[in-house]
Image (cartoon, rainbow, N blue to C red):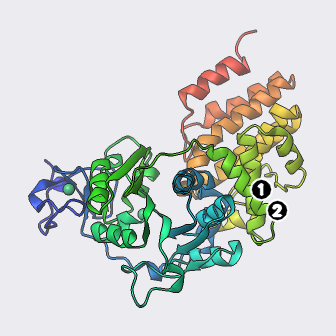
Amino acid sequence: MSAGQDIPDDHPAQCAACHAPGEHLSPVEPGLDTGGISLLACDRCGSVTMWPQPDKDYTAHAGSETELRDYVEMNCSIHDITKAVMPAVMATGAKRYLDVGCGFGFSLDIVRRLAGCDVVGIEPAHYGRAGRDLLGVPVLPDVLSGPPGARTPPELSRPFDVIFASEVIEHVSDPGAFLETLSAYLAPDGMLALTTPRAAAVTEAHTRNEKLAVISPGAHVFLYSAAAFEAALRQAGFPHVVVIESGVTQMAYAARVPFSFPEISPGALTTQYLQSALETDTPREPVSTVLQCRLYRSLIEQAQWEAASSLDRDIEIRMAPQDINFADYDAFLAKFRASEPSLSYLRGILYLVHERRRVDAHHWFMSSFRLCCAKLQIAPSVCAVEADMVWRALFHAALSARHSGDRELAARTWRIAEERAGADFLPDISEELRERADRELKLSGG
Ligand SMILES: [Zn+2]
Ligand SMILES: [Zn+2]
C-alpha cells in the first residue's frame, strides 16, 4: 500500500451513510487529484465517506453570470428532469409538488405546466432568484432546515404529494435526518424522488470531468451505494423503494404505499412542456429564446422535421467565422450562446436529412466543428456534449460534401480529423465513428 492510500490519522468515527464504525472504512483511489480529500469506502454498505468532511455555506454561493448562462442555455438537461419527475407526479396524481434545491427551477415549470400542480421550490443559491424572476416560478431563497413548525413559511405548511431533491443529499452531513425532514413534508400517500451520484462511479471508468463531478471535492460529504441509498429510505419509513442506477448517478423513488409507474415518453413530454411555455409570456427574455432553442433541439432529436423546419426560420444561429479564438468562456459567451455549437450541428442535421440542402449543411457542420474546438480549448469542464460532438460534426460536414458530389471537399474535410484527433485539447475519434467514416464517406478506392 502506498503512503497516499493510508487511512488518515484523524479518520472519521463512522461511515456517513450507515454509521458503521471507522474500522470498516478503507481508502479508495479514484485516479485523479482530489485536493487533499480522502475517499473512504465502507465494507459494510459500499458507500464512500469524504475526509475531512466539507463544511460549506450554500447561502453564500454567489456563482457567476457565466455559470448561470452555461447552466440555463446548455448543461441543465430539461429532458432528464422531465424523465425523473414526471413518473412520480403521474404515479401519485400529484396536486402539490416541492423541489428542494431546485436550482433555476425548471422542474417547477415543467410540473406546473404538464400536470397543473401547485409548485414550490427551495434554493439558497442565486440560481433560484434568477429562475423566480425569469421563469416566474415560486422559489424560496432558503434551505429546508427542519420539520414543519411555527417558523415554517406558509408555502410549505400543507403536505406535498411529490418531493424532488436532485443532487442534494450528498451535500448533507446527516442524511438520515434529512430524509426524515423530507418525510415530514410529504403527504401519507406521497412519493420522494431523489437523485445522487453513485459511490461505485468513483472507481469505475468514467471521464475525468464526470468523476470530478461525482466527488466534487470540498462539497460532497459522502456518496451512497445503491444498497445503502435504498436502506436509508426504508429506515426513514418508506417500505416501497426503487433505485435506478444510470451512468454516474442514481435515482430513487420512495413511498409508504405500493406504486407503479405509467409508461411515459420523456422526449414527447419535453417537447410538450417547451411548446406550452413558449405559448405564454411568462418565460422572460433571455429565457424564452433559450427555450425556443431547446425546443428546436427536442424536435430534431425526435425527427419532427416539419415542426423543426418551421421553427428554423425563427431561430437565429450565428455561423462561426474561419478563425475564432477566445481568451476564456466569458469571451465566448459574449459572442455566442453556450448552446451554439449544438444548434449549428442540429441545423446541419435538419438541412442534410430533411431539407436536402447539402452545401448549407456542410457550412453549418463546419461552424459547429469550429465552435466545439473553441469551447473545448477554453472550457473543457463544461464540454461533455462538445467532446462527443466535435468529430461527429466534422464527419457530417464531410458526409454533406460527399452527398453533394464534392468528393474532394469530403476528403479534405475528414483529413482534418485524421490530423488533429487526440492532439492538444481535442479528444480521439471513437472506433464507431471511424468505421462509419470508412463505410459512408468511401474516400479510399473507387
Ligand atoms: Zn457504510
Ligand atoms: Zn453535488
Q: How many marks?
A: 2
Is any atom of residue 219 visible in this view? Answer: no
Hey, what amino acid is under mark 2?
Glu
| Front one among 335 and 317 | 317
Question: Where residue 279 is drawn, which disc sits there?
Answer: 2
Residue at 30%, 50% (x, y): give it. 225
Q: Which residue is mark 1?
A: 275
Q: Quadrant of residue 302?
A: top right
Vertical comparison of 178 with 356: above or below: below
Instruction: Give the CA separation, mark 2 to mark 1.
Output: 6 Å
Q: Does 440 sit above or below residue 33?
A: above
Left or right: 357 with respect to 154? right
The quadrant where residue 428 appears: top right
Residue 103 picture quarter? bottom right
User: In the image, what residue type sits under mark 1?
Assistant: Gln
User: Where's residue 208, x and y in %?
Assistant: 43, 49
Judge left or right: residue 97 versus residue 324.
left
Taking the spot 46% from the left edge, 82% from the top edge, the residue there is 59
> Are dots 2 and 1 in contact, CB under 8 Å?
yes
Residue 384 visible within the image: yes
Residue 417, label in figure? none
Where's residue 40, x and y in %? 21, 56
- What percent of the width, then of the height, locates residue 431? 54, 26
User: Horizontally, is 260 left or right of 6 in the view?
Assistant: right
Is the distance from the Cβ of mark 1 to the nearest ligand 2 atom less than 8 Å? no
